[in-house]
Each structure stands twice: as C-alpha cells, then as structure tokens.
Image: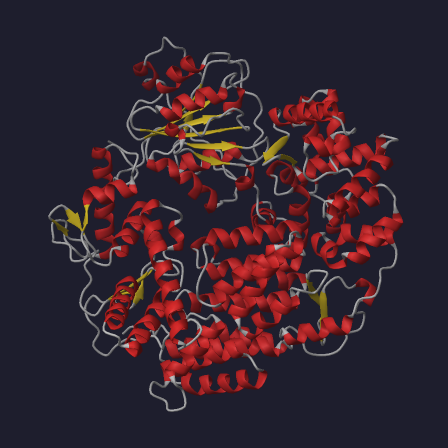
C-alpha cells in the first residue's frame, strides 16, 4: 500500500475533479499560496460524465503545464496541522469566507507524495449524502490517495455527508475537507473522535505573517507598524488584507496609512457586502448593526427589552447569523470578525438617529461588565466626552496599550487632557528594569501623554512604553525578571494573571513564557505562539515586536529567523530599543539551543552599550563569556571574570549565575567558584543549570560514534559532537526517534511502536509504516552503513527495536533514571546526604517539560506525568531536609 514514508518518485499525473453540477462559483480564497506549486505536474480536467471510462480518461491529450505562480507566503504551522491526515485522521477546515482555505488545500496537496483526488462542490448540487459519498469514493483509484473536498458547505446535508466519509473512509485514502462552518457536525460520536478541526482562529494571519505578506509577497515598503495596525483592524482575516494591498498598491506611505485608518473601512467594504452582508436578510443586517458595538453577543445583551420574548427574538437572529457564517460561537456567546464590527458600527453611527442612545446604553453595559476599552469606544460613539475622559483617566494604561496609536489618539483628542501620571516613578522602574539610563530628550512627551512605563535614551528619543495594570501590580514582576530572578517574577506574573484580563494580562502572559525560555526550562512552542498572538491582538506595537523576537527563543526551526527580521524592521523604523533587544534575544537563542555564537553576542553587547542599556549589556557579556567557555576558547576565563564583576556591581543575580557557569566551564576547580553554591543560587532564581552547563569541547581522541541526546526541554541530538539537523529526517521517523529515546535504550516491541504511532491504522499498514520509519532513521543516523549491514544504533532483536548508544554517550532520560534510583536507594538506607545529592542531579536534568514538541500524544503523557511527579517529590523531599528551596545540584557536565 502506498504511503508517504515509502521512498518513491512523485506520480506523473495528479487529477483534479469537479463533481458534475453548476459552473463553479468564484473562489473566496486569498493567494497566500499558489493554486499549484511550481515543480508539480497538476492537470485540471473538465467534469467527466458518468459513462466515460477511466481508460478513455487516460487517453486524453496532456495540456501544457501552468505558468509558475507568483511568490507566495508559506505558513508551516498550518501545514503541520494538516499533516494529521497522514495518520488516517480526517481533517476539516471550517472557517467563514476569505480565510484562505482553498489555497491552503492546494498548497498541502502540492506536497503530497502520492495520487491526489480533488473534489469541489458547486451550487445546486442537491444529491443526498449517500449519493455524494459514492461519487466521491469512485474518484479514489489507488491506495494512499489524498482525497480533497472543497466548498463542503454548499451541500444541502454537509454535516451528514462529512460524517459518512469520516466514519467510513475509502480504504487507503486520506480525507482533507474544507468549507464554511458546518453546523450540526456531531463530533461526540466515538467513530468521529479522531477528526481534526482547523478553525478560523488557526487560519488567521499572525502579525509576523502579515508583515512577511506585505514585504516578501507583495513587495510593499517595510513598515512593521503598518502591518501591526492592519492585523489589529482586520483580525488577521486574509481576504480583506488582500483587498487592502490591492487598493494601496500604487499609493504613497501617507495615503496607504490614510486608507487603513479611514472610517468605515472603505478598502474592504465592497468585499464584506458581496461575500457576507448581501447573503443576510434585512432584519439580520439591521440587528447586527445595532449590536455590533458589543465584542461578545449573547441573547441577553442583544435584547432591546429585558423580556423573554425579546431574548428569544435575539437568539433566533444570532443563530441565523451563525448559520450564514457571519458569527462564530464561543461558549455561550457569539463573536464577529473585528473588521465586520468596524463596518457595521460605522454604518449604524452614520445612518441611524437612534445610534447615540444605543451606544450610550452599550457603554454603561460594557463598563459594568468590566470592559473599559469597549466602554470607551461606545462612549466616544455616543459623543459622551465626560464618560470617555473618566474612563481614560481611570484606565490610561489599559486603554493606551490596547489600541494602535492612531485610534488611541482619536479617543484622546475627543476626551481632552488626561490626569497627570507619576512619571518619576515610571522612570525609576525603567532604570530598575535595566531599560534606560539618562535624562529627558528634547521633544519627550508630557505627563499627560504617558500611558505606561515610558523613558528616554540619550540621543535616541523615547523608549516605547511597557503596558502595566492601572494599579501598578505588574511593576513588581518586571524588576526581578530584569535582574534574572525568574522564579519570583514568574510567581508574580501568575498571581497577576489569576484575576486580570485584557491587554495587561496579555503582556503578563508573554513575560511569563519569556521567563520560562530565558531561565532554560523551555516552553511549548504553541504556548509561546499563543502568548505572542494575544499580545498582537491587544498591543502596543513595540511589545508585539518583542513577542515575535521571543519566538526565536523556542528553537523551533520555522522561527529561527524571527529575531533577525524584527531587528531589521526596528532598524528601519528607528526603534533603537526594540532593535537591540531583538538582536540580544536572537543571540541568546543560540545558547539555549546548544549552538553558541560568541561573535553574535559580542555584537549584541556592543549595540546595547551604545544604546545606554548598561544592565542588558551586562547580560550580553555574561552570555558571551558562557558561549566562549562552551567552545573552550582561550579568552573565556578572563571574560567570565569581567562579567562576574559587572553582574555583582549592577546587582543582577541571574547574570551572575550565568557568568559563574562560564567560569565552571572555563576554569574547572577554581577555588573561588563553588559548584554547590552556584547550584543553590540557580535554584533560588529558577534557572535550569543543565541548559547552560553544556560544554562543546572536542576531545583530543574522541570516540568514533559518541551520541548526546536531550529530551527534557526539547529534543536535540548530537553525533560525534556535531548537531543533527532533525528536519532532514522524515516526520514519522523523527517521532520514532523520540519514542525510542524515551525508553532509554530498552527494547520496545514493534506492536507497541505501531500502536503508539498509528493507533487507527490496520496492523499490516502500521507495521509497513514502522519498517519505513526505521529504514529512514537508520539511514539518517548511519549514512555509511551498507544496504544489508547490521544497524549499530537501531537494532531489531526478538521482535523489538531499541536505541543502542555507544559507550560514553549521554541520554538525559537515562541520567535522570540513574539519579532517581540512587536517591531512592540512599533514602532506603537512611543516607540523607547521598539522597540529596541524587535528587539534585535529578532536578538538574529533568526540571523541564519532556519532549515539548511532541504535543499531547498518548505515548508521552504518562512519562511526562511520571517525571513531573518525580520532580515535585524531589523538591518536597529536599525542602523537608532543609537543604535548599528546590534542590538543584552542581550538575555533571556531559563529556
């Protein structure tokens, strides 16, 4: 049976079919990706009458290959979501018009190594689910076929049809479907539990993707702030962004921005009318205009009168809007696209004499519900200057951080002068955080303009504001984070997030995940992306740039260049503070992923010093010393001593720990650096030493095949001292590699592996895929092994595979197992000191998420919980002994 893991050439023909019916309607897609990728022979045939045989089809003359598509945007995170179809899991793209579903289907089909049968449904096809299923299955003529269904929502019984295909797919086929939200789909059925639904939130363009779309695809002049504002206004909706680019293609920068900020979103109004509003009844349109000011719609909030009949009418209208794809359900509420809300609110404000009264009532309701930003907009539209000024005085930082500068300026101008802000306290906090040094530059904003921690760099103008809560609670978390006390900072951010929401909470969530990354514990890349996206929806723009640069710290291959892109954008915009910070994060990312680059860190330190950011420059110096020590460069010891002195002088305990890590590597056995003291201080600050104490030395006589494999905090492998590029390995072989490493060299029966990796596949198919994955893994690890040679790394013994490592290799899971065993044996014989030593070694290795890139797969959940419990137990036991707060040791440096 054909499968993606079987080495084979791409098929010479890919046939794309439309089911018989009316002519296709115009696509609502948006060319993020080509309809057919260059380099793939994909032919489109006209509808084939039922009586025509497949032999007659094959005799049709070939058509010329289509011209190469223009340069387009590729989004790896979405392709990874769709990759679930390779494991026989049906995938459904369900989103309103204009989210790029069709183009994403085409992009994924172009990567499929096997036959593709594409079916696009058309208006007027009124056949029943059974008839449609039979017609679709007839298109699957070979095992391993990717079955692509587009415009599923045009069928009269779309949900039932998809359920039939997903519950009983054709043998050997992989189902990928798309359409507008399919109502009535019963995913609670056991046979449908494996379906993957990709919704509108997944398909939205992130801010960094919009930035790339503008510059790399459409060739627009670089303007990261414009990309930010466009994302905020459109909510990342693909088609309106495309409309904006088409409307402004030949305009100058000032006209482009004027087009974006014009009331009534004129660049997208025509599209929204054609694709969304014209399909609604007049009563639904009028209803939506009246309630669009509310960010979340419920029958109770939308009812004009507090009566059961009014709520019932509102509920009916909301359901009709949902059926038309205008609203999406979120719990008990309905949500509309931000851009559509802007258009509806503008039309209601300019056409209805009732608008001021409706907006005034909405302002009171939103204020009572704890939404000051929504209340401020409603008060502005109601022309209630007094209410707006009161809201902006009470919540200056929250409102200021949530809005792009243009829209915030509109509110500020209408409200009038704001109350003064304690600017001296803000400056003091900024200097504590290590952001600025120096006095006020000419033209600095007045107290009335401050909406956060704003400060000034000598010669560089204003530093962007740090969004804070109005009560100043989050201030107490930023200072320890800047000093490197990640444990205290994380605890304070967590406490803040318990009862906060909105822009300040988004900023706190971003800083929280950055604490985990910078401390060496790592974080799930999806968590970091979610935090960055929340910031992108709330602002301010400079913090969004920090969030985008922070994606580089995850080590994910698709985000390695984000920090460099942010630095380049900041340099173009004159954002010195953002540029140097992005460069610093990009340089630090090399340390975190085990690829130190001392030259990049030296350059980062120089830029930070020139910007007057002395505290951050000290951090960069400590990291540079560590990078040189990891590479065993001769100047490492002297640089480490200088970084140690600077960190003590500026009272940066975290940088001091990093500098002493450099000394432990560069000067092993130095009398003035005690490993246990460094370990205890790292535990107090929440720093995972094992991430930083990774020597990258080349031994005088290295073994032939030494292997270094890390599973905690992110999967990484080195062979003969050189990092392995795991992206060169097939996806299922990568998963197999991680699974075998998880068993720490113990044999794993092939049935266990097949069931873990392909739980829904037939046994024969699963075993065939396993053999293919093993074959590719062996070739990757042992490229010089002959076709019939015995595998040194992945032998097959008694029906089981195992990962066999040569003598002298290092596997962190095995090291954690050894430390835990020794600690428990010492506890059994009453040796408290030996137990504490073993527990410290355990925490040095295992105090991070196990295989974060794997996600919530069943085979990794149990080991994750086991190691999480072991780490918690170790901390508790060490606390009982009173040895330290959480007991991290002076870790062993793997040789």
How is the rendered protein coloured? secondary structure
Query: Where is residue 771 drawn, in percent x and y?
Result: 20, 43
Image quadrant assignment for residue 113: top left
Query: Where is residue 207 drawn, in percent x and y?
Result: 60, 50
Identify the residue shown where x is 77% and y is 75%. 440
Residue that extends furthest to the top in the rendered view of this protein? 51
Depicted 85 relative to depicted 468: above or below: above
Identify the residue shown where x is 58% and y is 83%. 650
Identify the residue shown where x is 63% and y is 69%. 476
Would you say 224 lies left or right of 731 here?
right
User: How many labels, in total?
Assistant: 0
Locate the N terminus by quadrant: top left
Q: Is residue 196 visible?
A: yes
Residue situated in front as seen by the camera: 779 or 795: 795
Image quadrant assignment for residue 632: bottom left
Depicted 553 relative to depicted 145: above or below: below
Would you say 57 lies left or right of 266 here?
left
Q: Is residue 893 visible?
A: no
Query: Where is residue 473 drawn, in percent x and y?
Result: 67, 64
Would you say 590 lies left or right of 790 here?
right
Image quadrant assignment for residue 51: top left
Query: Where is residue 865 drawn, in percent x and y?
Result: 36, 54
Would you say 643 lies left or right of 544 here?
left
Locate the C terminus by quadrant: bottom left
């Amino acid at each position: 049976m054909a499968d993606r893991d079987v080495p084979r050439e791409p098929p010479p023909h890919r046939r794309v079919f439309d089911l018989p019916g009316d002519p296709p309607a115009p696509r609502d897609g948006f060319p993020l990706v080509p309809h057919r990728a260059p380099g793939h022979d994909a032919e489109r045939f006209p509808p084939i009458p039922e009586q025509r045989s497949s032999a007659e089809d094959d005799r049709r003359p070939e058509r010329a290959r289509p011209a190469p598509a223009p340069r387009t945007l590729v989004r790896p995170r979405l392709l990874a979501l769709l990759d679930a179809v390779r494991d026989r899991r049906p995938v459904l793209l369900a989103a309103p018009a204009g989210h790029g579903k069709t183009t994403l289907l085409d992009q994924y089909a172009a990567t499929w190594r096997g036959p593709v049968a594409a079916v696009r449904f058309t208006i007027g096809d009124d056949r029943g689910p059974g008839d449609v299923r039979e017609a679709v299955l007839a298109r699957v003529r070979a095992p391993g076929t990717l079955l692509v269904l587009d415009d599923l929502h045009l069928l009269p019984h779309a949900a039932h049809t998809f359920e039939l295909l997903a519950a009983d797919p054709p043998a050997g086929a992989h189902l990928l479907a798309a359409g507008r939200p399919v109502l009535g789909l019963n995913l609670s059925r056991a046979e449908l539990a494996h379906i993957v639904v990709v919704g509108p939130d997944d398909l939205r363009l992130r801010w960094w993707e919009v930035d790339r779309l503008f510059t790399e695809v459409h060739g627009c002049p670089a303007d990261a702030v414009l990309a930010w504002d466009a994302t905020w206004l459109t909510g990342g909706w693909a088609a309106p962004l495309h409309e904006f680019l088409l409307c402004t293609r030949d305009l100058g920068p000032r006209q482009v921005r004027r087009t974006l900020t014009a009331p009534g979103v004129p660049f997208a109004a025509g599209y929204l009318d054609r694709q969304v509003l014209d399909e609604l009844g007049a009563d639904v349109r009028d209803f939506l205009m009246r309630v669009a000011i509310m960010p979340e719609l419920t029958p109770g909030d939308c009812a004009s009168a507090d009566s059961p009949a009014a709520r019932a009418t509102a509920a009916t209208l909301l359901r009709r809007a949902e059926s038309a794809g205008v609203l999406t359900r979120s719990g008990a509420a309905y949500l509309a696209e931000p851009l559509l809300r802007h258009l509806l609110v503008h039309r209601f404000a300019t056409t209805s004499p009732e608008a001021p009264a409706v907006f005034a009532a909405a302002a009171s309701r939103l204020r009572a519900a704890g939404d000051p930003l929504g209340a401020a907009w409603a008060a502005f539209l109601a022309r209630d200057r007094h209410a707006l000024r009161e809201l902006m005085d009470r919540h200056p930082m929250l409102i200021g951080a949530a809005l792009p500068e243009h829209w915030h300026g509109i509110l500020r101008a209408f409200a009038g002068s704001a109350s003064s802000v304690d600017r001296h306290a803000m400056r003091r906090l900024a200097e504590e955080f290590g952001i600025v040094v120096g006095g006020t530059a000419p033209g600095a904003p007045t107290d009335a303009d401050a909406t956060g921690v704003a400060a000034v760099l000598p010669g560089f103008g204003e530093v962007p504001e740090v969004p804070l809560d109005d009560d100043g609670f989050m201030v107490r978390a930023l200072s320890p984070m800047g000093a490197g006390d990640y444990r205290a900072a994380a605890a304070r951010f967590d406490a803040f997030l318990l009862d906060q929401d909105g822009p300040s909470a988004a900023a706190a969530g971003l800083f929280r995940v950055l604490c985990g990354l910078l401390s060496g514990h790592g974080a799930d890349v999806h968590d970091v992306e979610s935090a960055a996206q929340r910031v992108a929806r709330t602002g301010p723009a400079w913090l969004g740039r920090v969030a985008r640069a922070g994606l580089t710290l995850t080590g994910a291959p698709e985000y390695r260049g984000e920090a460099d892109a942010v630095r380049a954008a900041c340099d173009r915009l004159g954002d010195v503070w953002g540029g140097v910070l992005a460069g610093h994060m990009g340089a630090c990312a090399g340390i975190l992923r085990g690829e130190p680059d001392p030259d990049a860190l030296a350059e980062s330190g120089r830029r930070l010093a020139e910007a007057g950011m002395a505290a951050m420059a000290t951090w960069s110096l400590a990291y540079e010393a560590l990078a040189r020590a990891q590479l065993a460069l001769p100047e490492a010891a002297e640089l480490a001593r200088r970084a140690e002195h600077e960190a003590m002088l500026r009272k940066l305990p975290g940088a001091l720990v990093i500098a002493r890590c450099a000394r432990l590597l560069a000067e092993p056995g130095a009398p003035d650096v005690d490993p246990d003291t460094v370990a205890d201080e790292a535990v107090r600050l929440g720093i995972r030493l094992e991430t930083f104490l990774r020597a990258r030395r080349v031994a005088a006589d290295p073994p032939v095949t030494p292997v270094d494999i890390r599973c905690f905090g992110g999967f990484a492998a080195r062979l003969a001292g050189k990092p392995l590029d795991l992206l060169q390995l097939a996806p299922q072989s990568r998963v197999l590699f991680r699974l075998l490493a998880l068993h720490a060299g113990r044999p794993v029966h092939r049935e266990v592996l097949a069931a873990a990796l392909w739980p829904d596949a037939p046994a024969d198919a699963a075993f065939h895929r396993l053999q293919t994955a093993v074959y590719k893994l062996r070739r990757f690890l042992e490229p010089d092994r002959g076709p019939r040679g015995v595998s040194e790394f992945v032998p097959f013994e008694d029906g089981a595979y195992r990962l066999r490592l040569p003598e002298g290799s290092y596997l962190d899971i095995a090291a954690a197992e050894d430390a835990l065993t020794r600690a428990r044996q010492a506890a059994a014989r009453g040796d408290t000191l030996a137990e504490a030593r073993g527990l410290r070694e355990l925490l040095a290795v295992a105090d991070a998420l196990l295989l974060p890139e794997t996600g919530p797969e069943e085979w990794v959940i149990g080991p994750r919980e086991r190691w999480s419990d072991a780490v918690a137990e170790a901390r508790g036991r060490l606390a009982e002994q009173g040895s330290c707060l959480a007991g991290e040791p002076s870790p062993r440096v793997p040789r």
